[in-house]
Each structure stands twice: as C-alpha cells, then as structure tokens.
Amino acid sequence: MVVIRSAAEIEKIKKASKVVAQVLLKIKEYVRPGVSTLELDQVAERCIREAGASPAFKGYMGYQATLCTSINHEVVHGIPSSKRILKEGDVIGVDCGAMIEGYYGDAAYTYAVGEVSERAARILKVGQESLFKGIEQMLPKKRLFDIGASIQTYVEAHGYSVVRDYVGHGIGTKLHEEPQVPNYGEAGTGFRLKAGMVFAIEPMINEGTHEVKTLEDGWTVITKDKGLSVHFEHTVVVTENGPEILSMF
C-alpha cells in the first residue's frame, strides 16, 4: 500500500531531508585526493547528530556506517574505511539517510575527486540530469512507470545503462516503503500518482552493462564489467502543483 502523507507528515520528512541535504553539502567540502571514506563518514555522522537527527543507515540490516561511499566501478553500498583513500580523478557516490521525529529523508550525490577525465565528467552529467528527468514525471495522474521510463530513455539515449537490481522506493516513517520505483519501465503503466505520495528517486547509471554483483563483504555492489557507475537521489513529494524536492541542496 502506498501511503498518502498529510501536510504535517510531509513537513517532518522535509525536516529529515534537509538534514541529509546539509550533510551532502558539507561532504562536498571534504571530497579531495588523500581523504579516506571513513573521514567522510565521521563528518556526516557529526553533522547529523548536531542537527538532532539520527543516521538512518547505521544499524539498518546490520550496516555499520552513516554513509554508503561507492568509488568508480562501485554502484552502491560501498562501506567507509580508513583504507579507502580518494585519488585524483576518482568519482565517489555518497548516499546518506537521516531520521528525525520518526520520519526519514534520503539522498545521494556522486562527486568528482579533483580533476576527472572527460569520460567521467560525461557520465556524471548524464546521471544527474537523469534524476531530474524522472522527477519531472512526479505529477498527479501520471503513472508510476512514467518515472523509470523517462530515466531509462534519457540514459540509454546517451549510451549508458540503468541498473535493474536496485531501485528507488517510498519513504516516510520507514527508510524503505512501498512502492519500489524502478529506473526503467514502460511509460503509461503502473498506478496513478497522487498528491502526498513521497518517493526516493535514485537512478544508478552504468557506463557499460547494467549487470552488477555483490562483493564478499556482503554489501558493496559493483559493475560486472568494472565500468564506471554514478548514483544520484532525491526525496520528492507529489503535489498538485508539481514535484517538490525535499532534499534539494
């Protein structure tokens, strides 16, 4: 069942989402060559707790960090570590969630580390733009798969692929709620969207194949062909006046 949120609930989701936005903005100051992903995680946890919120990922299904930090061919769920040092030319996807007053916010951004190749810059641009292509479809009376179809069409037109195994989701009093929101699909299918629905839209875009696999740590998902991957995400509510991005920064 997809929950229709009240205005009061949406304000609480917005509050949590703003904390996440503040974290991703702060992380931008720290992303540079020589910094470990553990340092980024510590910055994020401090920022969340100073805001009076809790890290949503920490303890979720046994995960032990505040952020997911995924470098280059890692798609999602990279675990922060003192041994993972950023290098010039890397790209790093940072996924963050926060909970405050019983409501959740969730967002992700992929950063360039120093100067990146033209190849990396191109997929970063397309990945970020694809997120907004999906968000544009979050209008009353549009259908669920209009979101994924818009993302997929845009991404594939630029020669990239969208990950099938991991998708967006509803969000509110739980980090992950119904429905699943794929980044692919057939336009004009799925249930009709209504004002008050809140989704985390999160395209994961691969340079080559859409196929992925999970490393032995049980968390880190990588591209099967070791091509680059990027991940962008916002928490968004459907309103009568169009989509409102709650985690904008």
Image (spheres, grey):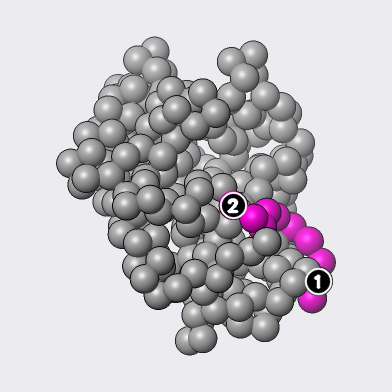
Q: Position of residue 54 (x, y in %)?
A: 32, 40
Task: Pick whichever, 159 or 245, lies toward us.
Answer: 245
Q: Is residue 63 above or below residue 114?
A: above
Quarter of the image holding residue 197?
bottom right
* Residue for point 18% across, 41% down: 50
Q: Position of residue 127 (x, y in %)?
A: 56, 54
| Pointer 1 residue | 189
Q: How far is mark 2 from mark 1, CA to CA?
A: 20 Å
* Residue for point 67% across, 83% down: 141
Q: Is residue 118 left or right of residue 54?
A: right
Q: Quadrant of the C terminus?
A: bottom left
Q: Is residue 31 above or below residue 173?
A: above
Residue span colored magenta: 177-188
Task: Pick whichever, 242 or 249, lies toward us.
Answer: 242
Task: Pick whichever, 179 or 159, lies toward us.
Answer: 179
Q: Position of residue 47 (x, y in %)?
A: 22, 40
Q: Is residue 78 left or right of residue 229?
A: left
Q: Position of residue 124 (x, y in %)?
A: 51, 50
* Residue for point 41% across, 30% down: 58
Can residue 187 be seen by looking at this rendering? no
Tell me the element at label 1: loop
Q: Is residue 36 above or below residue 234?
A: above
Query: Does the magenta-highlighted stretch encompass residue 185?
Result: yes
Tell me the element at label 2: strand
Q: What amino acid is found at the position of numbered circle 2 in the picture?
A: Glu
Asked if labels 1 and 2 touch by Cβ distance under 8 angstroms, the answer is no
* Residue for point 28% across, 34% down: 45
| Pointer 2 residue | 177
Task: Pick whichever, 211 or 104, lies toward us.
Answer: 104
Query: Does the magenta-highlighted stretch encompass residue 75?
Result: no
